[in-house]
Image (cartoon, grey):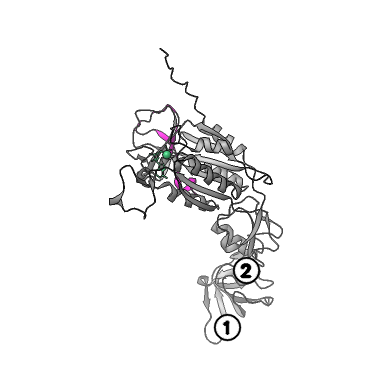
Amino acid sequence: MTVHKPAARSPLMSLDDALASLLGRVVPLSATESVATFDADRRVLAQDLVSALQVPPNDNSSMDGYAVRSADVTAPGVVLSVSQRIAAGHAAEPLRPGTCARIFTGAPMPEGADAVVMQEDTQDVGGNIHGVHIHAVPKPGQWVRRAGEDVARGAVVLPRGERLSPAGLGLAASLGLAHVPVVARPRVALFSTGDELVMPGEVPPQDMKPGAIYNSNRFFLRPLLQRLGCDVSDLGIVPDRREATLAALKTAADHHDLILTSGGVSVGEEDHIKPAVQQLGSLDLWQIGMKPGKPFAYGSVHRGASAAQPCHFIGLPGNPVSSFVTFVLLVRPFLLKLQGAPIPRLQPVMLPAHFTLARADKRREFLRVRRNAEGGLDLFPNQSSGVLTSAVWGDGLVDNPAGASIAHGDSVPYLSFAELLA
Ligand code: AMP
Ligand code: MG
């Protein structure tokens, strides 16, 4: 009688090693394009933005009030006649000594004036004399915004690799840029695998066959990719058959930088991704020491002989929370590097656990938690990788080291979804 020994378990790969290995395979995209500044939110700059002008263009008032020569106001109560009125967007005459200029926020300072007295510190003389009492002695430079104090001419305002934010777009516009040079969008083909999957809208809940579930991963993976600036081709659900999987991969590889799939990367016999990718290129199946998200696949699919690079392949686990967490911790940095953006270091905040985790896991665990009103963290009661409610209820993850249990009140590293999904 032959005794079958159980296959030796391969050691788990650490998340840090998996990330380093993944990033090591990325060559940033070289294609660039010019897009309207209005449309450049979250895109990555392909060149430094250098200012051709200074912002603001000239010294101007930051208050409604009176522009003065500070030397003319030696004591409170001095009366100055008003020799001109300067509104924002209008030119100023040089300020005659011994007079002041009525001035409004954003209006250019008249030559000779070196300070502004806010109108609350003045009083009209009254009658038919056009003059004001100055009640407060101004310091030179008071309420004056200096030319170039925001941006100096020739300054690099935003560096290449910067992912543009709304404030960054405003800054680009303040330099007169209607268009900005950005890295081409990564072209990503997305598909889900699994014969149990049904698209919402196709079958009403009461008519779902036993074992059928709705495809939820597709609904968060697509927007996660789009938020990272990707141009997504959504190929829908690919049935659990070798031929269908091969056909989907072949078509996708030619026109995309990355094929991203969910499901089918475990080692069950219904998992067709592995042999199909291996037939068309190469694939590594990683068992990552993280929970959720242990099975993860990286590979590449060959394309036509003329293509310089093969198409990247990433296979995420099918369980929704595993798919979500591995996207955030691995695919997101991968896509940032593909666009030449710096990879942000995770910056956990230490917060008190208002829960206990008696049974430590062998793997580094990313617990779905939520900040509470007392400044502590509550734990979602069901941490199963199939329970997507945990990721909706939660506002972040506790990055809990392998083998560490948590006692009530322990300080634990918290990563907010706001930061992880930015
Ligand atoms: P797999 O990785 O294919 O073995 O799938 C693991 C688990 O995730 C199974 O319970 C699947 O039914 C489920 N699953 C796979 N893909 C999806 C999806 N797109 N949406 C929701 N659940 C999924
Ligand atoms: Mg499956």
Image quadrant in which the N terminus is located: top left
Mark drawn on residue 109:
none
Q: Is mark 1 on a helix, strand or loop?
A: loop
Foreground of the two, 321 or 76:
321
- Mark 1 is on which residue type? His
Foreground of the two, 366 or 31:
31
Magenta stretch? 398-422
Residue 218: image x %, image y %? Answer: 44, 49
Q: Mark 2 points at which residue?
A: 60
Q: Name the residue under label 1.
A: 130
Give whichever of discs 2 and 1 has the lower sequence position: 2
Q: Assess disc 2: are there few (<14), some (14-19) or many (≥20) residues with their C-alpha within 10 Å of its C-alpha.
A: many
Ligand 1 within 8 Å, label 1 CB: no
Whether residue 140 is visible to the viewer of this picture, yes or no, is: no
Q: Distance between the residues labelled 2 and 1?
A: 23 Å
Query: Residue most toward the top?
Result: 1
Q: What element carries label 2?
A: strand
Horizontal placement of 370 versus 329: left or right? left
Foreground of the two, 189 or 32:
189
- Mark 2 is on which residue type? Asn
Q: Of the residues tagged 2 and 1, which is closer to the observer?
A: 2
Q: In this view, does 266 lie above or below 45?
A: above
Foreground of the two, 9 or 420:
9
Ligand 1 within 8 Å, label 2 CB: no
Residue 189: image x %, image y %? Answer: 53, 49
Dividing the picture into quadrants, the one containing residue 250 is: top right
Horizontal placement of 63 versus 265: left or right? right
Q: Assess disc 1: are there few (<14), some (14-19) or many (≥20) residues with their C-alpha within 10 Å of its C-alpha.
A: few
At x 47%, y 36%, the residue is 265
The answer to if 413 sits in the magenta stretch is yes
Query: Residue most toward the bottom?
Result: 128
Residue 371: image x %, image y %? Answer: 38, 44
